Amino acid sequence: MNDTPSRLPLNRTTILLLVLALAVIWFVPLGWRHLLPSDEGRYAEMAREMFVTGDWITPRYNGYKYFEKPPLQTWANALTFAWFGIGEWQARLYTALTGFAGVLLIGFTGARVFNAATGVFAALVLACSPYWNLMGHFNTLDMGLSFWMALTLCALLLAQRPNLPTSCVRGWMWVCWASMALAVLSKGLVGLILPGAVLVLYTLIARDWALWKRLHLVSGLIVFFAIVTPWFVLVQDRNPEFLNFFFIVQQFERYLTPEQNRPGPFYYFVPVLLVGFLPWLSVTLQSVRHAWRQPRQPNGFAPVTLMLTWIVFIFLFFSASHSKLLSYTLPIAPPIAMLIGMYLPLVTRDQLRRHLAGYALFLVVAAFVALFLPRFGTARNPAELYAAFRTWVLAALAVAFGLTLFALWLNRRGESGGGSHARVGLGAVAAFGAGWLLLGTIAGTGHDVFGRLSSGAPLAPAIRAQLAKLPADTPFYSVGVLDHTLPFYIGHTMIMVEHPDELAFGVSVEPQKWVPTVDAWIERWKAERYALALLPPPTYDRLLKQGLPMQVIARDSRRVVVMKPLPAADAATSAGQAGAADAPATLAAPATAASPAMPTAPESAAAAPSAAKPQP
């Protein structure tokens, strides 16, 4: 199929040890950081609410209907909470598993479709690329979507190998159709539209009409709709407003219009990919050139052409969109890694030496630049935070530099045995890749100096302690702001006031669940016997000047949490119960049960997030 060396540079035992080492680095740090707004907090809270209410059909966020995305990841996270408890590493586990599985998948596919060396190097490239590594450790939807789309692509590649038995082709194609269905349940129609468009374009470019005879269309469509249909039917039956909002507003208007306020120039994703594959930039163009020269399979199928079509079309598709986020082009990372993995075994030791020396110099320059990080300090993120983060960044760069030098040593030792024109050894490439993997892991962990503040988690113990002293139906208002992380950490939903933010749809279909103006909230606040509220500091200062009765129970530079001062008799009773209330965590019912107009299912006291405890 190609001229890539087929022998493994290392034996299977060594490769198994590499996989185990990757698993340790990949999974151990999951709980070392607080959840970040908005995606991590949002999807963790949606899963928590699904778990504690037992409603697995209608997704809700902060107590409001939330139909922006399908429920696959919410289901997975809710199951993780059911099995392992509620916490930060549990919220990231599904994302981490799909990222890790993607590495193994691309390695397996490379070994089966091309050769063993391609599979090993492709897996190494993907695991150690900052784009895939970092996105595999954040609780967002794009890693799950990217894994199921990668499985769609890989299953198609595996099914089209020449001389396969019909039953084997059919089995892999069923996997392809099933993974497309799961991609749709992950993020919507892109899970079907993108692979479908790539298949049509590939057929036109390669003129491979015979491929359609091997897709098992009829049985494949049965598999696809058997997986996709049930949830859409059930959610529409319970929520008649679902289909229009999900398909028209979220799937088409989101792509075609700038209403989501996520603009970006057409070249937006160019720097994303340059940084995302930074360790391998010096071999990327050579990899594409080498891949382009590969012949077709004996059955006429051209796997490289399919992968290149996948990469180019999906990149252009999201570049043309009016809504852009860094993670949108993540589905093209696995085939990019495959193309690089096909070429890396052909690199000579002399070429690798120059590659490693260049990156060693780059890391030194990056360390010098990192010294000036505190200059980026702002009122929102003071210079002290950047100074603390600098320590982590310098440590990460030092580790990467050390492993790059080690890779140079391994490469030089290999040269002494085979000459500078001998093929590159996997040991040197693995050491270099490990340096970048650890760079992202260490620097990403250090980013928690910012994440701790943005999460609001340090405020959670005081808030939960106060909630435990109050009736279960005590309303908790969020005035003029949607905090994406605090509801998860305190185990309590909030009633939106004045500013619905991204909960506008939920508010529109259940208007009784919110307070439209601050003035209306003030009247309600004065009438309540018990109540809590989350306020931005400027709003708190303004209301304090107006004489609104408030007692601060927790605050930081970004948020103030207040309660309605208790009547004297209640305050004495509360003080007498303080010892019991300060015992380890019990939670009140969700704040959406705050008034007769806002019923909701009760939450279990056992659902208190273990991650609410401040982390080191």
Image: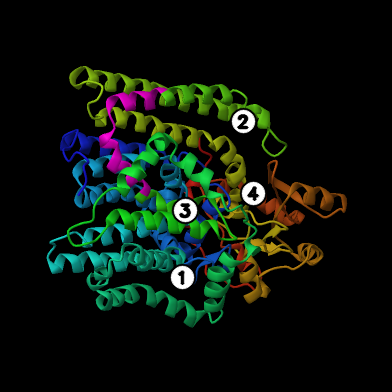
Q: Give the residue type that dot 2 points to.
A: Tyr
Residue with the mark numbered 2: 386
Q: Give the residue type that dot 1 points to.
A: Asp
**Residue 600's x, y, as percent?**
56, 70
Mark 4–mark 3 Cα distance, whole angstroms, equals 57 Å
**Residue 392's x, y, as percent?**
51, 28
The disc placed on residue 329 is 3
Q: Is residue 347 magenta?
A: yes
For residue 332, side relative to residue 171 (left or right): right
For residue 544, side relative to residue 242 (left or right): right
Q: Is residue 38 magenta?
A: no
Residue situated in front as seen by the camera: 389 or 314: 314
Q: Verify CB contact (< 8 Å) between mark 2 and mark 4.
A: no
Mark 3–mark 1 Cα distance, whole angstroms, equals 32 Å
**Residue 440's x, y, as percent?**
45, 35
For residue 394, side relative to residue 481 (left or right): left
Q: Secondary structure at mark 4?
A: helix
Q: Verify CB contact (< 8 Å) between mark 4 and mark 1.
A: no
Residue with the mark numbered 4: 576
Look at the image and tell me whether residue 123 can be seen: no
The disc placed on residue 55 is 1
Using a 10 Å C-alpha cutoff, classify the residue at mark 2 as few (fewer than 14 neighbours), some (14 to 19) or many (20 or more). Answer: many
